Image: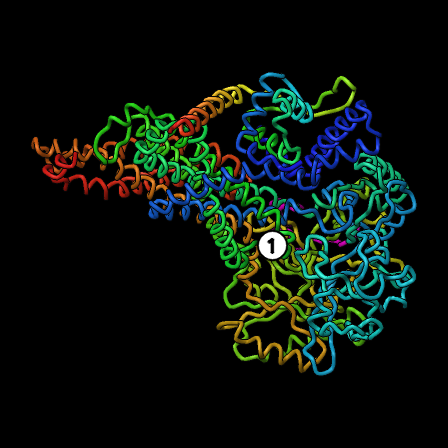
Amino acid sequence: MARNDQLLGTLDLLVLKTLQQLGAMHGYGIVLHIQRISDELLRVEEGSLYPALHRIEQQGWISSEWRTTENNRRAKYYRLTAIGRRQLAREEQKWAELVRGVAAVLRFA
Amino acid sequence: MSLRSRFLSVFRSAQVEQELEAELQAHVEMRAADSIDRGMSPTEARHDAMRRFGNMTRAKEDARSEDLLVWLESLWQDLRYGARGLRKSPGFALVASFTLAIGIGANVAIFSIVNSVLLRPVAYPHPEQLVMLWSTGTQTEKFGSSMADIKEWRARNHVFSAIGSFDYSALTLSAPGQEPERAHGAEVTANFFDVLDVKPALGRNFAAEEEDYGQRRVVLLSYGLWQRRFGGDPGIVGRTIRLNTFPYTVVGVMPRGMPFMDNRQPADLFVPLSYKPGDNMATRENHYLNVVARMKPGVTLKQAAAEMNVIGGQLAHEFPENAGMGIKIIPLEAELVGDTQKTLLVLLAAVGFVLLIACVNVANLMLARAARRQREMAVRAAIGARRARVLRQLLTESLLLSFCGAVVGVLLAFAAFSVLRNFLPDTLPRFNEIAIDVNVLLFACGAAVVTALLFGAAPALHASRSDIAHQLKETGGNVTLDRAGKRARSVLMSGELALAAVLLVCAGLTVKSLTRLLGVNPGFDTRNVITFSVPLYGAEYGSTEKAVQSHNEILAQLHSIPGVEAVAYSTDLPLGFGGGWGKLVSFPGRPAPASRADVPSTMFQLISAEYFKAIGTAVVAGRAFTDADDATGQQVAIVNQAFAHKFFGSANPVGKTVLMDTPPGLASTHLAGEPQAPVRVIVGVAADIKDDNGLSQPPLPRVFVPVGQAKGEGGFRTGLYCLRMQTDPMAALASIRAAIHEFDREVPVVNPRRLEELIGISASTQRFTALLLTLFGGVALLMAAIGAYGVISNSVAYRTREIGLRVALGASPAGVLRLVMGDAIRIALVGTAIGLLLGDIASRGLRSMLFEVRPGDPLAFGAVAVGLIATALLASYIPARRATRVDPLTALRTE
């Protein structure tokens, strides 16, 4: 699978949103969720996901803990923090503005 | 992630690594499991999962670098921002970091001493297992032990893996065509270095049979002597060198840098401790050996002490010579530190005060700067900087400053140390191990961080709390200072003066104590007297009689040197520099004590006829010795005043008799086959001479006996000489060497020095303490002056408009001066008063270090109060003067 470069700028937003929707989830679950919800349109590169998770955790937007999955496997679960929720709101707004802006340019005839 | 876990992620990278590994592993397994559910073969599924991941190592590295990078990046931002801020005000940066450099540098210098002397473990393997064993008696707290006792301890104990012992010793090292040299070292039992667990760098340790008499002509060299005297000759082992004119075979060279006990005395070489059959030194009487033992693994100090207690009791019961004696056990490390601990801790506390003062000064500067930057902070807050972020940025700036200070400080400490080295007290153990090592550098870093928090926290909190709206509304670019900031600075200023006062009080007390100590009458006259020792160890000086005869010949030679007023030799020197010789004493005709443990002891010294004249001590009753007091004449003694007072009270002891032995009826100290001590008639009383007890304490009772009547009193070989000249005695050193050279080419002149040097060395700890405390006090005073200047000149700048208005309304220069100085006086009075109160408490901790000065000495306190207030007022006067010259027009226009 080719690197999905267009995702890079929006990966943070996708991860934060996913965690808002799912509550606590591990990395693999985040990948599956984004893939499924986007009807396979968006595929998160594992190689970019984990650096992103760690960076976001550093910013204090998410926190992590080790838990057991339904299949009795140990995995690291991430969840949104209060700061993360505020950040998500900002990112969503930024995204909406971007989409509006780009759409306006495209619509210009 | 919290700051803490971020630190951990930097330092505990192994654990982070594992966690990351596990996280990615879990991911791969979950995907593989899903694929298998969808019908893929397990191998294929696993392969696919791995492939999707791309490069696993790369992913891990990327994830890991995010942890550090984000943190480092923002740190780097703060640092750059801080550096830019400091560059913009170079005056502030320079003054602040230099102040901190002095504070941190002084701390690093003192800490490097504390580190080597108190903290660094003794450089032997498992030093915690090593202990020293001492004999105790009814009259003396602890003293050396006898070989006979040590043998019993070895046979009876179960707690030590080995017991070794040593005696400091010096041997004359000679070689054809070379100046003979006195090499210091020790006689050690063959197992001694096995007890310490030190192996020679070359050759071998002593073998057990080398303790046997006749086998003992073997020597271990120190690394230093091997390098210095033998040019590091790799073939030294097996070679023969001349010691005390006898040939000794070198069996080994000890490792480089091996410390020997407290390292106070040089240890150039080691020879086996051995006794010829029937040697007086090997008897149960001769308590002179230092004992070092290694506890078996798992044995506690308590267990060892309990067992030695039992053994001591057994010996006291079994041997009459051991009546009243016991055994004391002291961990080697505690023993080596001795009583220097207190001095060093006092100095460390004092130097900590200096750093605190430096912090206060810098905090003051920061507050002033914060006032100037309030608008900047307000702007930052207005555009959305969180308070924590601003706080962190300000603290980073403080850290930057204090690390600059620490770097310069460590360099200063290096420089200071090369000077300080010359003033280190001679009583300081392990002084030659002092170095700036990793511990010291860590300490410097720690000091920098603590310092930054101390001086940075308050100003940072203060600055970051600024009220945005209020600040932005303030007009003009003038210096502003809000009320709270001004009060904070006054409080800091008072605190600084108080700290300086505490230091100055302590410095004043120790200086006064030192002057008192050096002003004590030592009991001898130091002017133009040189002392040195002449050891006679060749085969031709085989007996005490021959040694006395030879020393008398040397004496005659020395007498012929022009300008000699008096010359004498003896077995001891004042102030404990001769080592001291104790004996039991009894008084014929008086009832004998019930047991040997109750027989009193006294110091003992053999002297030649002119001794008192040479050393400049008065014979206050009776007569001095003459050359007629020889073996054939009446056996005589002179006692000191302490002896006369203790044993004769107010009666005149002249004409009374003494015996340097136990009274008849109790086990004698003399050896079978040797002459008995004679009964002596006291012919004179000499004024007290300060002795092993030091300058501050009264001397011990002492008996002097003429060298010509040494028979029956034990032997000696080394003569300790005193030579009184008409002029500078050191000028005669060449003649002295020539005279002794003429007598015997293989005899060295050891330790030539002026008599007053002994006083200097004896007071060196007090001198060191007084010097450093004075230095610290001076620095504190200087910083307080700078601080006062800063506070007042800032307050003047703040009030320029007000002052201008007052002047415009007709205030006189004197009135303005009063207005400004009023602040300074209030601050100085409050600070000094608090400081004197604290100083009173602090100085009580010094009590045991003071001589003839009470902790609350009014002179010291008065001088400090006057000096400190005067300094603070003087420093404030300069900016206050400036205030009187404020031009009302300019002042009012600037707003």
- The answer to if B472 sits in the magenta stretch is no
Is residue B330 in sight in this rendering? yes
Q: Is residue B163 above or below residue A70?
A: below
All told, the count of numbered labels is: 1
| B21 and B311: which is toward the camera | B21
Task: Please identify the quadrant where the N terminus of chain B is shown.
Answer: top right
Q: Quadrant of residue B187?
A: bottom right
Residue B305 position in % (x across, y down): 81, 37
Q: Could you tell me which quadrant the C terminus of chain B lies in?
A: top left
Residue at the far front in the pictured view: A109
Mark 1: amino acid:
Ala
Q: Chain of mark 1?
A: B
Is residue B832 in view from this perspective? no
Q: On the picture, is B467 further left or further right than B529?
A: left
- Lateral position of residue B445 relative to residue B311, left or right: left
Q: What residue did someone put label 1 on?
A: B435
**Could you tell whether A86 is left or right of B306 in the image?**
left
- Is B657 a magenta residue? yes
User: In the visual, does B614 lie left or right of B511?
Assistant: right
Residue B124 x, y percent position in the rendering: 76, 51
Above or below, comparing residue B71 to residue B695 in the picture: above
Which of these two is toward me, A37 or B476? A37
Identity of the residue drawn at 40% across and 33% down: B836
Residue B387, picture quadrant:
top left
Q: Give the residues in magenta.
A: B640-662
In-front residue for pair B440/B170: B440
Residue B198 image offset from top left, x and y in percent: 80, 55
Secondary structure state at the residue bearing disc 1: loop
